[in-house]
Amino acid sequence: MNVHQECLHCGKKISATETTCPFCGKDPERITRKSSTVKSHIFGGVFIVVLLMAIIAVTYYLFEAAKIRASEREERLNRCFPASAQQLQAIRDGIKDVQASNDIKTAYAVKSNDFDEVYFVAAKLYGPNMDDGEGPGVWAISGSPENIGLTLSANSFAREFSLYLDGSKTTADVSMTNDGARIAEECAKKNP
């Protein structure tokens, strides 16, 4: 049985037992090995290019997603504004009834989209063992910023450090899950 192979240099058929092509004088095995080495280098190069493109695409996606999250966060924080003097006084009255030496310096308000006239107001508390400000507490205050109505505690910190009722256990049913509550809290955490 005579098996033939094709010389990769000149393309002529030669016997499979030949170590040198009788037509061109070159080693058909060596070119085969070179050819497979070239193919593996090409495959390796293509793989590296595809891998780099995937890394670039993922990095771009993560960067864009981070920009969108930062933009959304900034948009949320733009809803915050300094609490009115009346809102500040309502919170002070509630916390001083629990501990006279506790106070607030600033507070941030956000109008809730879940209610007609409710503002979530968040403030850090200062007092004994709270020199750097603790909390913040979050309260739901009805009415307008200048003409306030009912004040209720919206988070556990506000319940612990003020006399105001837990808003989630009233018919008003206000809590930290309502629109504006977490934003006010975030503003107070971000600012002194």
Image (spheres, helix red, strand yellow):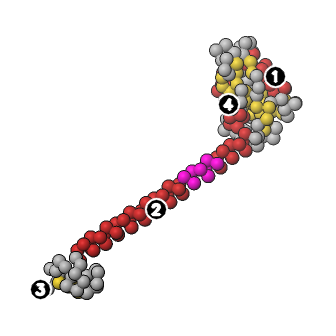
Say what amino acid the circle numbered 4 marks: Lys
Mark whose residue sits in front, 1 or 4? 4
Q: State the separation of the CA atoms marked 1 and 4.
A: 20 Å
Please report the bounds of the magenta region as a residue range. Answer: 59-67
Alpha carbon of mark 2 to alpha carbon of mark 4: how far?
A: 45 Å
Q: Is label 1 in contact with label 4 (beta carbons under 8 Å)?
A: no
Q: Name the residue under label 2.
A: 49
Inspect the image, locate mark 1, and give the three-letter code of the amino acid beneath it: Gln
Q: Residues within 10 Å of mark 3 (few under 14, many from 20)?
A: few
Which residue was labeled with disc 3?
1
Name the quadrant containing residue 24: bottom left
Q: Callout 2: few (<14), some (14-19), or many (20+) C-alpha neighbours within 10 Å?
A: few
Q: In this view, does 132 lie to the left or right of 91?
A: left
| Residue positioned most to the right | 147
Residue 189 circle label: 4
Image marks 2 and 4: residues in contact by CB distance under 8 Å: no
Write down the residue under mark 1: 89
Within 10 angstroms of label 4, few (less than 14), some, or many (20 or more) residues? Answer: some
What amino acid type should be assigned to the residue bearing mark 3?
A: Met
Query: Is 171 in front, or is 75?
Result: 75
> Magenta stretch: dominant SS?
helix
Say if 156 sits above or below 39 in the image. above
